[in-house]
Amino acid sequence: MNVVILAAGMGKRMQSALPKVLHPLAGKPLLQHVIDTARSLKPSKLCVIYGHGGAAVPEMVGKLAESTGAAIDTALQQPQLGTGHAVMQAVPQIDENVPTLVLYGDVPLTTADSLRRLVEAAGSDKLAILTVEQANPFGLGRIVRENGNIVRIVEEKDANEAERAIREINSGIMVIPTRRLKSWLESLSNNNAQGEYYLTDIVAKAVLEGVPVVSAQPSAEWEVAGVNSKVQLAELERRHQLNIAIALLEKGVTLMDPARIDVRGELVCGRDVVIDVGCVFEGRVELADGVTVGPNCVLVNTRIGAGATIKPFCHLEDAVVGDKSQIGPYARLRPGTQLGEDVHVGNFVEIKNSTVAAHSKANHLAYVGDATVGSRVNIGAGTITCNYDGANKFRTVIEDDAFIGSDSQLVAPVTVGAGATLGAGTTLTKDAPAGKLTISRPKQMTVENWKRPVKVKK
Ligand code: UD1
Ligand code: CA
């Protein structure tokens, strides 16, 4: 099968410099949703028609093709003279021995199941249209039937009153026998209300030539909903998020409110996972059995081990959290953070590019960057690894059972030996030997007979 995706339209109502099909839905460009669904049908040819927005669309398609190692063709439609004219641009690229599925780059939520039904209905020699009965069909092409058989499609602007009363609409998604398609496209005219070459005119041509025209229906109306404005984009985003939330609930995940979760990527959950309101998941996030995520957390490309708790207001990115760990509230785990089992990271603690082994704690106000932290280490409040001299970064090593007193600075590269203790306020510039107390602050003294200055009255 060939797939042709129409994405040359301008999207004026988006009021944006970004081409419409590149606007993100669930963190992914609209067009990429369509390409991903198309690919799940394993087409032999995939061609994206672009036009408005210059090089941005083919660039995005090129990157996608490169990163996935599959070929995606592009064809420029300039100027944009209608949907029929758009499909004409793909003609040199498509294989005439297999049918062609036409999709729209701004209709992101069509399911592969519905498309498969349409492809099946078309077989090798029929024209199949994905149609929907809509309460408000305004603006859309109407399916005209005689004795139950589809005979043509009429656009809103060309329709008479009786035709405008038809509620079965053309989604625009069709499967067409390709050799026929080529000849029909050659004979299209733009003699209509919009002066465009309508793809929809091929339906009447098929009927004239005795090619059967059939239809299939999606399981829901939102599957064929297009995005023309930010309002429609926001509506489809909520619809999509609700679909994801329902799928999570069906798998046994507890969502405190299915209307208040945003998954912009892939969220994989074990059993008995609880997610509170206002959380955002980006990229691939894995929550193992028994994980609880408190309200208002953002997790990006992160793996959380079994039984761990993420308390409210945490931001985790490219991090791994061990089983039974406790993170937050207000913790930040930056890329390259790897925490072992039962690690406690408390409020206003930032960890970056560091490993922290089992049972270690940094409970309050600390920065741990470029560090290797052993097991059962206690990092006191206000501790900072000074990992950066303005040009280079250095590692800090804290071995097992070390105790870092509050408000210490560890000037990397530096090592704190196993079981070592740093006194509070230590500025460590040389290695601290294992098992000993190291302290760098001057001895405390008291000045006798000292008096506070007093204001002299004038
Ligand atoms: C088209 C259909 C209409 C259907 C509706 C569904 C035609 C003539 N009409 O309407 O029956 O109900 O879709 O939404 O086909 N595009 C191009 N190049 C062009 C024109 C459009 O690539 O020259 C792309 C657009 O980017 C968009 C899609 O084709 O993705 C549909 O275009 P749009 O203008 O939204 O639809 P209509 O032509 O109004
Ligand atoms: Ca149009």
Image (cartoon, rainbow, N blue to C red):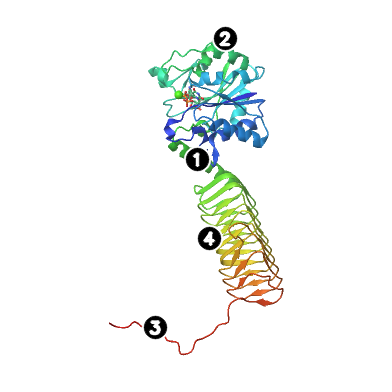
Assess disc 4: are there few (<14), some (14-19) or many (≥20) residues with their C-alpha within 10 Å of its C-alpha.
many
* Numbered disc in front, either 3 or 4: 3
Q: Which residue is mark 2?
A: 209
Residue 326 is drawn in which quadrant?
A: bottom right
- Give the structural element (helix, strand or loop) at label 2: loop
- Disc 4 marks a residue whose amino acid type is Tyr
Q: Which residue is mark 4?
A: 330
- Give the structural element (helix, strand or loop) at label 4: loop
x, y (%) of residue 337? 64, 57
> Which residue is at a point 52% across and 57% down the rendered structure image?
313
Does residue 89 lie above or below 11 as drawn?
Answer: above
Q: Is mark 2 within 8 Å of ligand 1?
A: no
Q: Which residue is mark 3?
A: 453
Confirm or deny contact between disc 2 and disc 1 (CB under 8 A). no
Q: Is residue 211 visible?
A: no
x, y (%) of residue 431? 68, 70
* Numbered disc in front, either 2 or 3: 3
Assess disc 3: are there few (<14), some (14-19) or many (≥20) residues with their C-alpha within 10 Å of its C-alpha.
few
Q: CA distance from mark 2 to mark 1?
A: 42 Å
Q: CA distance from mark 3 to mark 4?
A: 42 Å
Mark 2 or mark 1: whose residue is earlier in sequence: 2
- Give the structural element (helix, strand or loop) at label 3: loop
Mark 3 or mark 4: whose residue is earlier in sequence: 4
Q: CA distance from mark 1 to mark 4?
A: 28 Å
- Disc 3 marks a residue whose amino acid type is Pro
Residue 93 is drawn in which quadrant?
A: top right
Q: Nearer the viewer, residue 275 or 367?
A: 367
- Disc 2 marks a residue whose amino acid type is Glu
Q: Which residue is mark 1?
A: 237
- Disc 1 marks a residue whose amino acid type is Glu
Q: Is residue 105 visible?
A: yes
